[in-house]
Amino acid sequence: MTGSLVLLSGGIDSATALFMEARSSDRVVTLSVNYHKRNKREAEAARRIARAAGVVEHLEVDLQFIREAMDLDEGIKREVTELGVPLTFIPFRNLVFYSVGLYYAYVLRLERAVVGHVFEDASLFPDVGERNIAALNGIVERMVPWRRLRVVAPLLGMKKEEVVRTAIELGVPLELTWSCWLEGERQCGTCPGCRKRRETFARVGYQDPTEYDCPNP
Ligand SMILES: [Zn+2]
């Protein structure tokens, strides 16, 4: 028996990681972290995707004290901007999220805490990357030597287009995924999240099944 805890945001990347994991693991649990101003539509998307993947359980953890840099003070915003890091940066987000994932993986007797980082995340955010994950797994092994437990990022070597191609191959319900920064009935089609999504699908040459408020920006 193998088991995985997948950190699921509701976007394409973690949904793809989930469907990959569902193929290779006997038991999969998903977990979403609700931080400050977490997009409600994205949280709903995560619930629907988890259901579609047939997970054993979908957990939601409230960590409202966690804020993105854009919701923190001016000094932090300036610091992050000067570093060239997006304002969606959260200090130690990944360490907190990995730890929450590891906690639940431990208590639910699962071996892997799976995250959906992709290649571009590692170039944009200083806290994402293979070396960070390898170092963290070294610490996990020292802290819990009696268990085989680790953090895994199966998409880290893949660029967005490759992730979308993989998602199509795996039958990920892309129409359920949410990329929009707003919380409308449909994805807006023009915000940075929607723009990136549209560009990626255009490059892959695949018709995105989602409906946008603004179909032709
Ligand atoms: Zn949008």
Image (tube, rainbow, N blue to C red):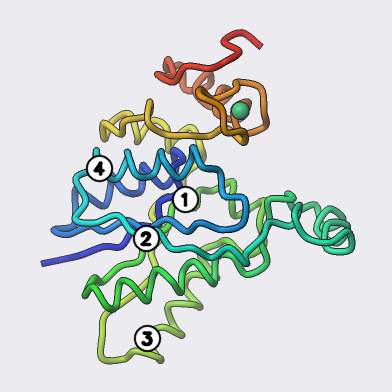
Q: Quadrant of the N terminus?
A: bottom left
Residue topped by disc 3: 141
Mark 1: few/some/many CA within 10 Å (<14, 14-19, 20+): some
Report the disc number at residue 53: none
Instruction: Name, please, the residue furthest toward the top.
Output: 216
Mark-to-mark CA distance, 1 and 3: 23 Å
Residue mark closest to the camera, 4 vs 3: 4
Mark-to-mark CA distance, 4 and 1: 27 Å
Task: Name the secondary structure under disc 1.
Answer: loop
Residue topped by disc 1: 157
Residue mark closest to the camera, 1 vs 3: 3
Label 2 C-beta lies within 8 Å of the nearest ligand 1 atom: no
Position of residue 196 in the picture relative to residue 81 (left or right): left
Mark-to-mark CA distance, 4 and 3: 32 Å
Instruction: Give the image quarter of residue 74.
Output: bottom right
Q: Of 131 and 139, which appears nearest the observer?
A: 139
What residue is at 39 percent from the left and 44 percent from the top?
Answer: 46
Residue topped by disc 4: 51
Residue topped by disc 2: 114
